[in-house]
Image (spheres, rainbow, N blue to C red):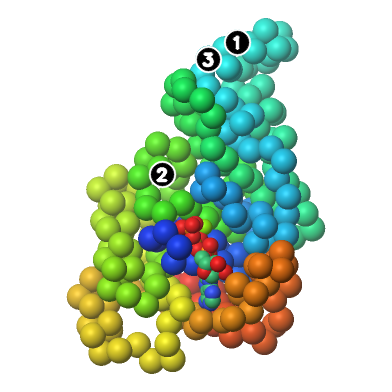
Amino acid sequence: MSRVIAIAGKGGTGKTTIAALFIRSLVKSGKRPVLAVDADPDTNLPAALGLCAEKTLATIGGTREDFFAHRDQVPAGMPKEAWLEMQLAQALVESREIDLMVMGRPEGPGCYCYINNMLRKYLESLGKNYPFVVIDNEAGLEHLSRRTAQAVDTLVLVSDYSLNGLRAAERVRDLASEMKLQVGRVLLVVNRAPDELSAQFTSALASNGIELAGRVPVDPLVPEFEIAARTVMELPDGSPAVRAMEQIAETVLAM
Ligand SMILES: Nc1ncnc2c1ncn2[C@@H]1O[C@H](COP(=O)(O)OP(=O)(O)OP(=O)(O)O)[C@@H](O)[C@H]1O
Ligand SMILES: [Mg+2]
């Protein structure tokens, strides 16, 4: 049985960093292989993990028009879905502990519904081969209804230490339920948080009813490494963000 963990929240709150740190914790504690899915068209997760994705599902899939234009390439007797799956498999980046699939950004006008539907089915069946699937999402969740809506065991909402961040997390949670996404559990990570959350923040958190998985402190090494083109996987074991996420990962997996 695979476990699907999706990371979402307001722009810039640290979703990609949290996703990469979470994947790192899984790998370091022997919970592998992990399928990492970058569902943000801006595609930052590969760099955070130190992997390079040359192809994306969106560029391989193309539009419905592209697909039907290449129909003659489908070998005789092969169902077109199976052929498309074979093409999409080329976007999978494999490494020793982490495999990576990048959704990418659809290019140009055209109808993507057919392909998106295929992508969703493909990702769902691919995910079944892994004990853990971690999805880094773009800000908000609207795209999930269009593209990657799949059953999620744990939705980890990332907020910064602000009431705006908390409200955005709440909206994402409500949107997930309005869109009838199948979500098992919703948890919150407060990123760049102080050692103690203020009484106001704690009471806002209590009133929105999202369960707190934990907080990650400001860690100067995180941006320093990013600027030096070093990956989250290379951060020292004792670094505050790494340690905080190790605890959070345990909490997320225990729930
Ligand atoms: N705990 C932290 N301490 C210090 N810097 C952090 C921390 N978490 C994230 N950052 C930095 O904050 C910036 C934004 O983080 P990140 O890219 O992970 O956010 P995001 O939510 O994925 O953004 P986007 O919405 O653009 O996808 C990055 O430069 C990252 O290095
Ligand atoms: Mg991001």
Q: CA distance from mark 3 to mark 1?
A: 6 Å
What residue would you read off at disc 3? Answer: 65
Which is nearer the eye, 90 or 196?
A: 196
What residue would you read off at disc 2? Answer: 144
| Residue 118: percent from left, percent from top | 52, 29
| Residue 46: percent from left, percent from top | 66, 54
| Residue 59: percent from left, percent from top | 61, 31
Inspect this view and state whether residue 83 appears. yes
Q: CA distance from mark 1 to mark 2?
A: 27 Å
What residue would you read off at disc 1? Answer: 69
Q: Secondary structure at mark 2?
A: helix
Q: Secondary structure at mark 1?
A: helix
Report the side of 183 relative to 121 (left or right).
Answer: left
Q: Earlier in the sequence, mark 2 or mark 3?
A: 3
Name the residue located 45 percent from the left edge and 63 percent from the top edge.
12
Report the side of 95 relative to 161 (left or right).
Answer: right
Q: Quadrant of residue 50?
A: bottom right
What amino acid is found at the position of numbered circle 1 in the picture?
Answer: Ala
Do the residues under discs 3 and 1 have CB atoms within 8 angstroms? yes
What amino acid is found at the position of numbered circle 2 in the picture?
Answer: Leu
Which marked residue is nearer to the observer: mark 2 or mark 3?
3
Vertical arrangement, residue 162 with respect to residue 202, above or below: above
Which is nearer the eye, 185 or 146?
A: 146
| Circle 2 Cα neighbour tier, 10 Å, few/some/many (<14 / 14–19 / ≥20) | some
Residue furthest front in the image: 227
